[in-house]
Image (tube, helix red, strand yellow):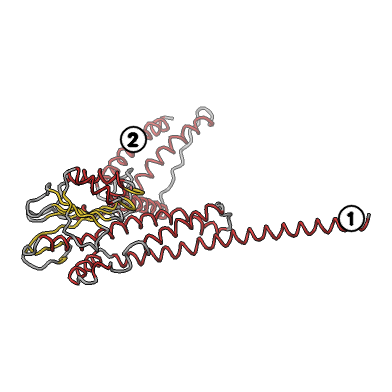
Amino acid sequence: MSLKILWRLHQPLKRTQACGFALRTLNRLNSVPANRLNCTTLASSASTLNLLKDGRNRHTSLHNHRCFLPRGVCQRPHFEMLTPFNLKSKTWSLQMRLQSTTTANKSVLKQGGMLGKRTFKGPRTKQPSRTNQPSLEEDMMQCIAYATADQYHLPTLCHDLIAHGFIEIKEFPRDASNVLVMGTENAAKPYDSGTIFIFREGSVVFWNVEEKTVKTVMRILEQHEIQPYEVALVHWENEEINYTVGESNSKLHRGIFLFNEELDYDQVVLEKFAFSNALSLSVKLAIWEVSLDNFVESIQSIPEMLKSGQRVKLSRAEVMQKIGELFSLRHCINLSSDLLITPDFYWDREDLEQLYDKTCQFLNINRRVKVVNEKLQHCTELTDLMRNHFSEKHSLRLEWMIVVLITIEVMFELARVIF
């Protein structure tokens, strides 16, 4: 009897010692870096976890045995044997768990974000060019172009600008009738005078004009616009290029306009007009590209519906409206603008034509027009498909109506013959 009592007293002490050893082993495991874990460390940690688990199991089993055994009878608890196979399998399981956790944490950190934080996508449209521009040097000046509306009413706009203190530059060729050239005394830098080119097609180009004056002109333009664009889109889809005055010939070099300081004022204005003409086409094309992207988004669900066999949720009037929007956009790009051909103004001015062509090439206008026309062609094919579908559906309805009318007439004839 005394031996049994001594054995019972020895078991809690043994479990306490095992738990203390297990906790010390786990603390040592946590202090070891993940890349220095080896099989021996993992094996010791696995055996430690077995000791903790077996200790809890033994305590539960002893309690259960005490509940069901008769008084005065003590049963020796059953200890699970830690075989080499069990040790190997549990060690491998713990190693794979640690490896998966480490891999997951590395993948999150590799993506450049913290846990629990969401990374935002960039804007869909192109980034404004001013964010990529380096800081202006002392002798560098700025040229910026906007497209604010489909058209401007130039006669009333000219009177309004003159009333606000701007000066009209009248020494300009008459064959450039689609542009209004204005001068201002509020230049951003003293190396060149401030000049503004306002094109009838709804674009404006500022040369060395201070920011306050630019905002004033933009507010005046709002009163003479025909079908204006959104303000956010106007300030997003712009073009900015730096320019300077030097001793070399006028040219576009590494994204910077260079003007010859020995030229007279009239010739400099003509060269600025050539550069401004290309910039105005670029910003107008950017606005049309956004309009085309919006149109593509509005019809992108139609091919998926046709593919899955679903019914297209568009009426005949809506399809005709989409066709009208598409042809209006094609007319603006290919017919009412100078995107496909060189303007007549440059036919007898080869030096200005070279500046115009170089700027168009720098702004990738020809390639962008080609891409836009390919998208327009695909959209035209899709809208033609929808129109043919509705036409066939309407023709089928008319045929069924004719069949029903013939059937009714035959029934009336049979009824008259019978009766």
Q: Quadrant of the N terminus?
A: top left
Classify 16 as above or below 166.
Answer: above
Q: How many neighbours does mark 2 have within 10 angstroms: few (below 14), some (14-19), or many (20 or more)? A: few
Rendering quarter of residue 115: top left
Rendering quarter of residue 353: bottom left
Q: Nearer the viewer, residue 89 or 273?
A: 273
Classify 301 as above or below 160.
Answer: below
Q: Earlier in the sequence, mark 2 or mark 1?
A: 2
Instruction: Report which residue position mark 2 lands on.
Output: 16
Marks 2 and 1, how far apart in space? 108 Å
Looking at the rendered structure, the secondary structure element under dot 2 is helix
Instruction: Report which residue position mark 1 lands on.
Output: 415
Of the residues shown, which amino acid type is indicated by label 2?
Thr
Q: Position of residue 159 (x, y in %)?
A: 23, 46
Q: Position of residue 120 (x, y in %)?
A: 32, 48
Q: Position of residue 112 (x, y in %)?
A: 28, 51
Asked whether residue 43 appears in the rendered view, the answer is no
Q: Nearer the viewer, residue 28 or 324?
A: 324
Asked whether residue 259 appears in the rendered view, the answer is yes
x 36%, y 61%: residue: 336
Mark 2 vs mark 1: in front:
1
Q: Nearer the viewer, residue 311 or 386?
A: 386
Q: How many neighbours does mark 1 have within 10 angstroms: few (below 14), some (14-19), or many (20 or more)? A: few
Q: In the image as oriented, which residue stretches furthest toward the right?
A: 419
Q: Are marks 2 and 1 in contact (CB under 8 Å)?
A: no
Q: In the image as oriented, which residue stretches furthest toward the top?
A: 71
